[in-house]
Structure formats: structure tokens, C-alpha cells
Image (tube, coloured by chain):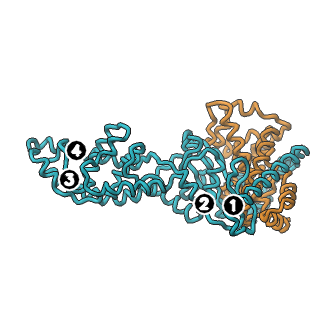
Amino acid sequence: MDVEDRELVAQAQRGERTALDELLRRHYDRIYNICRRIAGNDADAADATQEALMAIVRGLPKFDNRAAFSTWSYRVATNACLDELRRRKRRPTPGLVNEHDGWAAHQGDDPEPAFDEQLVVRDELQAALNQLPEEFRAAVVLRDCGGLDYAEIAEVLGIPPGTVRSRIARGRAKLAEIVDPGNQPPGAQRQNLQS
Amino acid sequence: MNPLPPNADDLVSAYLDAEATPDEIDVVESTPELMARVDSFRLVAGDLSEPLTPPAQQKEAHIAAALGAFDELLAGAVTEEADDGASAPSPSAVPTKAGPSSDTAESAEPVSLDAARDRRAARNPRRFNIGIIAAAAAALLLFVGLGVLSIGRGGQSDDVANSADAPIEASVAESSNDGAMDDRDEAGGGLSEFDADGEAIRQEDAASPAVQPTAEPFAAAEAAPADDAMDDADEAMDDAGEGEITAGADNGASDDTASDDTASDEAMDEDSDSLADTDLAKSNFFLGEFEQEEDLQLLVEELTADEIESRLAIAEELLFVRCADIAELEQATQPTLVGEGLLDGADIEVHRVDGARNSNSFIIVAVDGCDPISSFP
């Protein structure tokens, strides 16, 4: 797959439209899934996916095959999604959530109800996912929807692999807790989750 | 039963993803609670990995739009090549920009960045430089202090003009404090070697007479927007920096003070050289003023690795990074600030987010609130 991707990338970089068409079709569904899961609703996912495709077209000439095209395109898609979330946050109210607070910002009183009110939650899992901080959500989605390994996710998100591992673990723990409230983490871990 | 390790979920999650070490695998597999947790996580991961089917129409529309942008860029690249005389056709036709902002395009092959740098130079506006202003303020304080000293000595200023007629060894053109004033003196012209890029060079040339003794060293300052404190500092620094100036009557320095001045002038001139370098570096650090994010992103993406490293070093050494504590940079172990600029009129910083494999990714942050705006590529 990657070898073929390489060839398609090379052809597209030479200006071959059909190669780009094939490349985009091949990865569209995965990109859409990542955007849909990270963005949390159809409208934002559509915008983010479109942005991602445009960014891929823009960035293709500089793509140097250091990473697999899939990894790179997911990275572009993830950034497009996170940007879409940031734009959405800036839109509704002047009192923005402090996303730098990370996990804590999503506990207790949500300072930006308009954010979640906009979401059209399709299923329970997506609802749970939407409760995760973006950085945790992105890591979990890239792993479970994108199928990327920790090193690839680290590259996409620009964080160390150890942080990826931690974010995925905490994200999954939170998801498991939300989806199945009876499913509590092991004793020692519970305290860890609250930190 | 052994107590569960504090990072139990880490182990479980890594185990599930086949990312655990052999020791960790042993721990998980020998602990029933952890294996139960693995099942729980597997359920969540399995649900998440269920693909969502994108609406077919949307998919086609998105791909069509992307291909349309590709065509547009291709056409733009061809046009640009034709405009350039088509003397050296590129083997690659894909330009680097898309969308409405694609007024320029470049091939996928390595290309000269001169055009981009020209655009950057054209964009670079002058900039209010905190470091320069701080230097000017320090100079102002120094001369106020000298003035007070002079007054304190009382009655010794009768031969002010004589004393001030003496040439003062100084490096006029290198004075960063003059530069500081010139930053403020945008409307009035004057020495501008510390302003941004090409315009600075032109103005420096135009201002070269200032190196020579002049009867009206403050003409430019007078033409500038009024700022009394800054004007005072300007005058003070002109006195300090320019040789053979015939002092005006408003210069309250006595002979003794003039001697002190000479000593402090020399010290200041030494500082000025380094300050000049510093301020020049700071000025060049400014990325420019942009209306479109894409333009800023393009500019940053066109920076070479050496340029980026140089910028990181400048920021580390000379600048106060205002938005270093955002979540996206929490793992940064190296300097991240690549540049500053204006995006749609708002102050922004561009930070490099270190990739795990040394790849570059950047984030634009609005300085006001340190709000991330976008990440790229």
C-alpha cells in the first residue's frame, strides 16, 4: 500500500490529476473517520475533512516521503480538525475555555456550553469521546480509528511516545468509565485519573 | 494479592496495542484485574474502530473541490512560469499553495526561495521593539541622572558650550539608541538601520549624513510624532552618540560632567555595538504582517532548517516568549518560538512543535490570550 502510495504521490507531484484523485479516494474514508471522531459532529467533520484535503493538496509538493503518506495525511487531518475545534471555540462566546488546563477544563462546570450544544451526538461512544479533552481525544482516535502506532501518533501530534501512551490510556479509561459506569478502573489507577 | 501498579491503565492500554514491553506483558497477564481491564479497553477500542461511512455526495464533493484546487494551482504554476519567461521549465508542476490565496505557486522540486524572501521583505512592517525602547529608557534614566548630578554640583555649568564643543569619541551609526528612536520615528524618517529589512537599508543609506557633524541632529525627531520622553531620550542619545556636536544651550552638562559623559559614552558605545546586533536580529525575527493564515504558513514552511534554528536561538537568547506555556508546547524541551508577526492585525507567535522524528510542525498562537489559531502542516 505504501509503495503504491509513494508512486501515486510522485505522480501527483508531477501534476498527474488522476494520481491525486486515486490518492484522495484511497484515504478519504480514514481521514473522514478521524475528523468525525475528533470533531464530534457531522458539520464540523465535513468542514475539517474538506480543509484537510485542501491542506494535503497544498502540502503535497513538500511531502518528502519521510513518513508514510497515510501518516502524513492523518497528521494534516488531525491538525485541520483541531483547528476547526479552535475556531468553533472562538466563535460562540467571548469567554473562552482555557484549553491549556487540559483535563481540568473539562471537569465540573463547562465554561462553554455553546460548544457542546452544537454537537449532534449520534451515539453514546461519540458522546463519551466528546467529553475528552482534545489532546486525549486525538490520541485515542488516531490509535483506534487511524490504526497508527504510538511512534506515528507521536509524530502526528508532536509529542513524545510516552505521552501518547499516557494519553491513550487515560482517554480509554475515561471512555470505559463513561460508557459503562460500573466499569471502574483498578484501585490505584482511580486516583491517577483524578490527577 | 499484589497491589496493582499505579500505572495500571498505562500497562493495560499498551498491552492492548502491542506496545508493552515483555516485563509489562508479564505483569498484565499475571494479574486477573488487569486482564479484565484489557477486555474493557478492547471493547471501547473495538467500538471506536468501527468505520463511519462518509456521505457519498460529500465525499465526491470534497474530492472534486480538492482536485479543482489542484487544477487551479497547476494553472497558476503554468502561468507563473510563463510570466517568468519560461526560460527554465520546472520538471514538476505542482505548486505549493491552494485556495483563494494561491497567488503564487512553486514546483515540487527544490526551488529558489528568493521570491518568497522578497515577499517576506515586502511584508515586513516596522515594529515596535520592546528591547530598543528599553534601551532608550535606560539611556533616558542615565542622562536624567547625569543632569541631577550636574545640578547637584551647582554653578559649574558656566562653560557648557566650551566643554560640549569637544569632540566626543563615538560610534554614531552603531548606536542602538538612535535606532530605538528611529523605530518610534517612523513618520519622521531618520536612522532606520534597526527597522525591518530592505526599507531599513535604504533609510540607513539616506541617513548616512547623520554620521557627519550636523547642526540639526534632532530634525528628524522634531518631525516625528510628539513623545516628550522619547524625544528627550533621542536628544540625549544623539548627544552621546554623535561626535563633534556643538551642544545646544539646553545641554546642561558641565566640564566635569562632560568627562563623565565621555567615559560613559565609551561604555555605552561598546554596549551599542552589541545592542545594534541584538536589535537587528530582533527586527529580522519579525515574520511580517499577514491577512491570510495561508500566507503566514507558507512563509514559515519555506524557512530552511538553518533559518529555523537561527530563529529559535534568537528567541531563546533575546526575546521574551509570551505564549510558551500552552498545552501544545508542554512537552517541548527546546526553544519553540520561530517568529512573531501580525495576522489580521493581531499579534501572533509561531512556535515549532517538535515531532518525535525530528519533523517540523508549527502552531500559530494569538498572543492575546495565548490562543492557538492553527497548526500546520
**What amino acid type is highlighted by mark number 1?**
Glu
**What amino acid type is highlighted by mark number 2?**
Ala
Quarter of the image with the C terminus of chain B is bottom right
List the residue tagged with mark 4.
B145
The answer to which of marks 1 and 4 sits earlier in the sequence is 1
The secondary element bearing badge 4 is classed as: helix
The answer to which of marks 2 and 1 sits earlier in the sequence is 1
Q: Which of the two discs, 4 and 3, sits closer to the camera?
A: 3
List the residue tagged with mark 2.
B115
List the residue tagged with mark 1.
B106
Mark 2 touches mark 1? (CB < 8 Å): yes
Chain A colour in the picture: orange
The secondary element bearing badge 1 is classed as: loop
Q: Which of the two discs, 2 and 3, sits closer to the camera?
A: 2
Q: CA distance from mark 4 to mark 3?
A: 11 Å
List the residue tagged with mark 3.
B261
x%, y% of residue B81?
70, 62
